[in-house]
Amino acid sequence: MINKTSRNLYATMQHKTISSKSSLKIVLIFIMASFFMACETKKDEKLQESAPEEIIVPEPQMKYGYDYNLYSAKEFEIKRGDTFGAILERNGIDYPEVYTILQVIKKSEVNIRKLQIGKPYTLLYTKDSLPKAIAFIYTPGVESYDVVQLKDSLFAKKVKKPVRVVEIQATGVIQTSLYDTMNASGYNNNLTYYLADVYAWTIDFTRLDKGDRFKVIYTERFVDDSVSVGIEKIKAAYFEHRNKPLYAFEFKTDSVKGIVDYFDNNAKNLRRAFLKAPVSYSRISSRYNLKRRIAYYGRVRAHKGTDYAAAVGTPIMATANGTIVKSSYNKGNGNYVKIKHNNTYSTQYLHMKRRKVRVGEFVKQGDVIGWVGMTGNTSGPHVCYRFWKNGRQVDPFKQKLPEAKPISNKLKQEFFTNIEPTITQLNCLSFENKEEVPNLVMN
């Protein structure tokens, strides 16, 4: 009895002891967990307190190949007497350094020996307490610029700006002249001369009529998004002169030699054996007239040439292929050139400021043979253009001049296929007065 009771009592005490130990263990675990959580919280707070603020890096401001965020830039213009060396010395670069830089430039394509007055240049400086010039950028033209690195790794290079070619459509109705119409419409001024070249053999642009009209599809080259660096080419054109439609489509007739010509809608070459005029887009001041009263001489005297008034220095072109048979000077003609084209035709160009060709040279149609001047017996700047046929001086405007070779039969189908989309494009253009152009029909 006693033994049984003792065993029960021992068991009860043992159970209480185990329960007490378990409770103690749980309490200890809870205390330790709370401690670690507190430590982690403090650690996080410390990390948050010590974490650096977020650094915002500005977007690169690139120009001329440099990040303008890292440098200060100052822009100047070349002044009279400025030289590259003088500019550098003014900006804290001693002569020995200048000499070293010049030696580097000497081996590059950059030429800054003759800086042009008025042209812009930029100097980049370090952003130190004592700024130092580290780069010289010179912009002699709109298409490129020169970079000279002045510190650290010295170099000099010419950088060409990326060119964007844009196709442009131009239309207009002549009121006074082609140039005035182009200018009033805001088109590139040189478009007048390009269009005059396309139709140089078929239209006399000095005798346009009010109401003549045109459509042109051409490409123009731009840098810096909006700065024009010139017309590239005329792709197609429509010109209505005295109610007669004249189409022009660019087409390469020889892919090996790169020969490009303009043809009408029937694949007929617009070019003739002779240009209409020896100067681009000028006015006729006096025509061939055997009974003209010449002011210079004060009496009636036959004028066997056609005078084209133009500014002094305007290039004079050979109106057809041929050989120079005279390049000389005399009191009446001044500086003059004569070209023999074949056994039938010869041409002569008078009153030049200066001649470019010599006797015996072969020239091609459009080659510059001299420049407009006032030499010899003349009262103003012009070129007197004279035309011989079978040894007799004649009026070139009354001659039925030979045409250039037509497009080959082999290329005709290719030509018609190529111009189809351009025809549609031309026909969809409207003139300024909203009149419709007759739809192009190919025969």
Image (cartoon, rainbow, N blue to C red):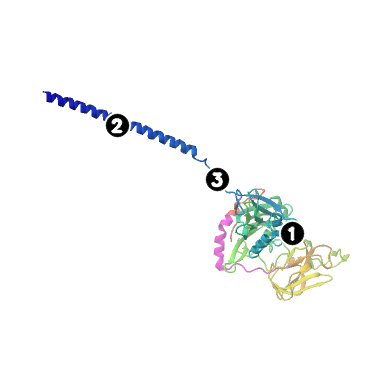
Depicted 188 relative to depicted 19: above or below: below
Say which residue appears at 63% left-offset and 69% top-offset: 405
The boundaries of the magenta stretch are 399-424
> Distance from label 2 to label 3 (Cα)?
55 Å
Say which residue appears at 73% left-offset and 53% top-offset: 180
Q: Amino acid at mark 2?
A: Lys
Residue 405 inside the magenta-drawn segment: yes
Depicted 227 relative to depicted 316: above or below: above
Provide the residue designation for mark 3: 57
* For marks 3 and 1 on the same chain, the one whose residue lies earlier in the sequence: 3
Residue 389 pos. (x, y %): 74, 72
Provide the residue designation for mark 1: 206
> Distance from label 1 to label 2 (Cα)?
114 Å
Residue 390 pos. (x, y %): 74, 74
> Distance from label 3 to label 1 (Cα)?
62 Å
Q: Helix, strand, or loop for circle 2? A: helix
Depicted 183 relative to depicted 302: above or below: above
Q: Helix, strand, or loop for circle 1? A: helix
* For marks 1 and 2 on the same chain, the one whose residue lies earlier in the sequence: 2
* For marks 2 and 3 on the same chain, the one whose residue lies earlier in the sequence: 2
Name which quarter of the figure residue 87 lies in: bottom right
The quadrant of the picture occupied by the C terminus is bottom right
Residue 293 inside the magenta-drawn segment: no
The mark found on residue 25 in the picture is 2
Residue 254 pos. (x, y %): 58, 68
Q: Amino acid at mark 1?
A: Thr
Residues at marks 3 and 1 touching, judged by CB atoms closer than 8 Å: no
Q: Neighbour class for label 1 at 10 Å: few (<14), some, many (≥20)?
A: some
Q: Amino acid at mark 3?
A: Val
Residue closer to the observer: 307 or 153: 153
**Residue 289 in sight from this viewpoint:** yes
